[in-house]
Amino acid sequence: MTITDLAPTSFSIPTLETERLFLRAMRAEDIAEEVAFFDSERSRAVGGPLPQNQVWRAVAGMIGHWALRGYGFWALEDKVSGRYLGRAGLWCPDPWPEPEIGWTLMAHAEGQGFAREAALAARSHAYDTLGWTTAISLIAAGNTRSEALAHRLGARLEGEYLHPTIGAMNIWRHPGPSLAPDDPGHASWRPQ
Amino acid sequence: MTTPVLTTDRLILRAPDKRDEPAMLGFFTGERARFYGGAYDLAGAWRYFAAQVGHWALRGYGMFAITAKDRGETLGLAGPWHPPSFAEPEMAWLLTEARHEGQGFATEAVGAALAHVFAVHRWASLPSYIDRDNGASRTLARRLGAVPDPDHAAPIGNCETFRHFAPEARA
């Protein structure tokens, strides 16, 4: 009989940096913004609305996701103002069909290209650091803003997934690691 | 983040992680989760366990995985749990399967978790919210010295508040 694990348990959440954003671990201070978001109609596309207690549990679950899967959602922090803008990352809770790239912005952060900037960083992390060979995004039918972003990221509509609580979602397939034309790391990428 | 590891005669208590996922999903999707608001579907079970894991990062403490020292098997969880709907942290526990019952594992684990949190956090007392139909947990709470606390209504339906006191508060 051998005791193999007496070391303190730990998991780490890396911080990524883009032109305008830090992608960092979610913290308790971010929850107030998420409570406001999940109290709004805009949250319907991602399983809302939710009461405060459920939002707290959801954020705890997002952090726990890192420990269970080795990846997860990052908080998006404005590098200049320090404000919490939303979250983006890599997501595969049970019973997800396969790992996805996800993004959700707070209302005040929309329309400035933050989701695209964060999704590209998350996708690069998936391909370059984690070695993913493919990635999807699950987008609720009718979420036109996210559909437009998926399209601009080079993803193609592939099929449908019936989410247990959100309902019908579309599966968008991203270009693979070697042919992601929207990726800043790709030779053909140019700033828009 | 770094989290504590507690060792007892037969158990190692550590922060829950992916090694505990199969046992915990089995618990939350099964009949034993009825005192935890279940049984849940797989999505709900995964969310609940992931929240228990992430609780450590938000609060700096959380429920420990109870593991058998000799073989590493996950037996359950025990430790403080503090969602915002609770006015104070609760000492909570569960054993994932019936075959782990009747061997004193929960007593050993909850006793160690209580000693740890009273020593580290200097809390004077901690409630446990126990379902009125959960005879095993009511017996365990009393065995550990907890007493019914009718002055603090439990924030969960059909539960009664038991209160554990720190050693200093008991003396």
Image (cartoon, grey):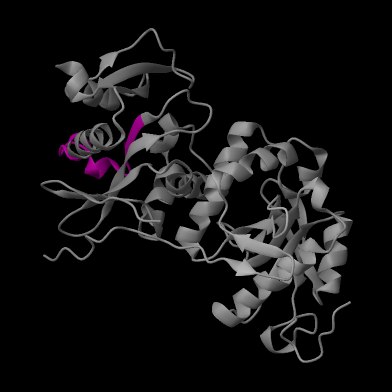
Q: Is residue B42 something one can see in this rendering?
A: no
Q: How many marks?
A: 0
> Quick check: is B125 in the magenta stretch?
no
- Of residue A8 and residue B99, the one placed in the foreground of this image is A8
Quarter that holds the N terminus of chain A: bottom left
- Residue B114, image x, y percentages: 24, 33
- Is A128 placed left or right of A157 in the picture? left
* Magenta segment: B91-107
- Of residue B101 and residue A78, the one placed in the foreground of this image is A78
Is A75 drawn above or below residue A70 in the view shown? Answer: above
Is A135 drawn above or below residue A114 in the view shown? Answer: below
Q: Quadrant of residue A95?
A: bottom right
What residue lies at 52% left-to-right and 53% top-to-bottom?
A: A63
What residue lies at 27% left-to-right and 37% top-to-bottom?
A: B120
- Of residue A4 and residue A18, the one placed in the foreground of this image is A18
Quarter that holds the C terminus of chain A: bottom right
Looking at this view, name the residue that lies furthest to the top: B151
Is B134 drawn above or below residue B10 in the view shown? Answer: above
- Is B89 placed left or right of A54 in the picture? left
What residue lies at 25% left-to-right and 14% top-to-bottom?
A: B147
Q: Is residue B70 something one can see in this rendering?
A: yes
- Residue B66, image x, y percentages: 27, 47
Looking at this view, name the residue that lies furthest to the front: A80
Is B169 drawn above or below residue A182 in the view shown? Answer: above
What residue lies at 74% left-to-right and 76% top-to-bottom?
A: A174
- Residue B155, image x, y percentages: 48, 20
- Residue A60, image x, y percentages: 53, 46
> Quick check: is B93 in the magenta stretch?
yes
